[in-house]
């Protein structure tokens, strides 16, 4: 299936599908392309954009890997467990914690959040409209 999604330039759309209905529509479109190949036209610009996006993704993954290696070396130098700096703030907030944080004043909320959940987006969990970056 992966080869067909790439052949018909549907992989990016497939990954970004947010519901089963969207995925089914995409698979139906792919089936139509398979049954009648004349309906598909290869888009050079889309291929170029996908190639650039893949390159960017690899670069970002490399940056993350280098960051993790730096943090592990730092922990090792300081005599700490290798994952020490990577685990700070990685605790997923519980429902009870979110309710408690919502009732706090903003300054206290931020301090409490940073203490154990700093790797997570506070707005996503606490604001009604969610994260503005999505």
Image (cartoon, rainbow, N blue to C red):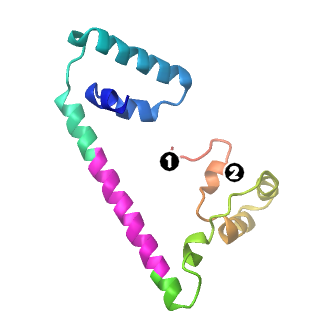
Quarter residue 48 falls in: top left
Residue 133, numbered label: 1
Closer to the camera in the image, 55 or 81: 81
Q: Position of residue 13 (x, y in %)?
A: 39, 30
Q: Is residue 113 above or below residue 130?
A: below
Against 119, residue 5 (above or below) is above
Mark identifier at residue 18: none
* Residue in view at x 19 percent, y 32 percent: 45
State the residue at coordinates (24%, 32%). Answer: 46
88 relative to 22 in the view: left or right: right
Other-residue count near label 2 (Cα within 10 Å), few / some / many at <14 / 14–19 / ≥20: some
111 left or right of 28 in image: right
Question: Can you name the residue that lies furthest to the bottom here?
Answer: 78
Q: Which residue carries the number 2 mark?
A: 126
Q: Position of residue 28 (x, y in %)?
A: 42, 14
Q: Which of the pair 16/32 is nearer the observer?
A: 32
Q: Is residue 57 magenta?
A: yes
Is 128 situated left or right of 84 in this image? right
Classify 88 as above or below 133.
below
- Binning the other alpha carbons within 10 Å of mark 1 as few (below 14), some (14 to 19) or many (20 upward) gives few
Q: Earlier in the sequence, mark 2 or mark 1?
A: 2
Q: Measuring from the top left, give residue 18's x and y in whole percent.
A: 52, 31
Considering the image in quadrants, where does the N terminus appear?
top left
Q: CA distance from mark 2 to mark 1?
A: 14 Å
As helix, strand or loop, the secondary structure at mark 1 comes to: loop
- By secondary structure, the bulk of the magenta-drawn segment is best described as helix
- Indicate the secondary structure of the residue bearing disc 2: helix
Residue 119, magenta (yes or no): no
The segment highlighted magenta reads: 53-72
Question: Residue at point 72% right, 57% down?
Answer: 93
């Amino acid at each position: 299936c992966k080869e067909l999604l790439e052949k018909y330039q549907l992989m990016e759309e497939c990954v970004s599908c947010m519901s089963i209905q969207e995925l089914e529509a995409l698979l139906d479109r792919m089936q139509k392309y398979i049954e009648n190949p004349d309906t598909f036209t290869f888009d050079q610009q889309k291929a170029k954009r996908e190639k650039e996006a893949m390159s960017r993704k690899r670069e970002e993954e490399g940056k993350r890997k280098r960051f993790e290696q730096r943090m592990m070396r730092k922990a090792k130098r300081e005599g700490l467990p290798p994952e020490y700096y990577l685990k700070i703030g990685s605790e997923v907030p519980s429902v009870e914690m979110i309710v408690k944080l919502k009732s706090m004043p903003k300054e206290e909320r931020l301090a409490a959040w940073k203490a154990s959940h700093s790797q997570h987006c506070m707005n996503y969990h606490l604001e009604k409209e969610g994260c503005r970056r999505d």
